[in-house]
Image (cartoon, helix red, strand yellow):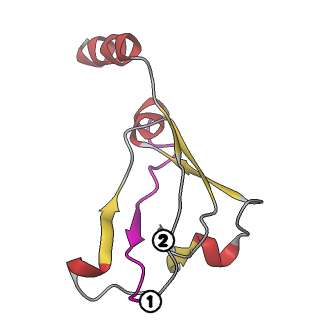
Amino acid sequence: SSASTPDDLAFPAHTDGTWLTIIPCASQPGLEVRASSGRVSLEKQGRYGINVAVLTGDFLQSMSNFEYTAASHRVLRPQSGDPERLSAPLLMRAAPSYREQCKQADAR
């Protein structure tokens, strides 16, 4: 799917500052993940209430020395007249003290 204007996007393309982001398939399409073949609509691939997507985050990318790359994704706004889209992602972050230890280790 291609959003033609910024107004078509609820959230523009971004990566999450997490280890992982776990996202149950939402009630309506809207989440798109960048893949080598283009953008993939996860809700069109999975089933609401059954499937989840697991996206790698910036922290995992950094800690794995880019073995895993952070998943770029965006969220499209529902079209006028479409049902509301409900989503409840779980963002798995490192504790602030751990992030600080990693920064100090990287500085050495």
| Residue identified by numbered label 2 | 32
At x 37% / y 52%, what residue is drawn? 15
Q: Residues within 10 Å of mark 2 (few under 14, many from 20)?
A: many
At x 49% / y 85%, what residue is drawn? 82
- Hey, what amino acid is under mark 2? Glu
- Hey, what amino acid is under mark 1? Gly
Front-lying residue, 17 or 82: 82
**Residue mark closest to the camera, 2 vs 1:** 1
**Residue 60, placed above or below residue 79:** above
Q: Position of residue 107 (x, y in %)?
A: 23, 16
CA gap, disc 2 and disc 1: 20 Å
Front-lying residue, 18 or 90: 90
Element assignment for label 1: loop
Q: Position of residue 78 (x, y in %)?
A: 42, 79
Main secondary structure found in the magenta portion: loop
Query: Does residue 3 appear left or right of residue 78 in this picture?
Result: left
At x 37% / y 39%, what residue is drawn? 17
Per the rendering, the mark at residue 14 is: none
The quarter of the rendered structure image containing the N terminus is: bottom left
Quick check: is 71 in the magenta stretch? yes
| Residue identified by numbered label 1 | 81
Q: Which residues are magenta?
A: 65-81
Q: Residue furthest right?
A: 50
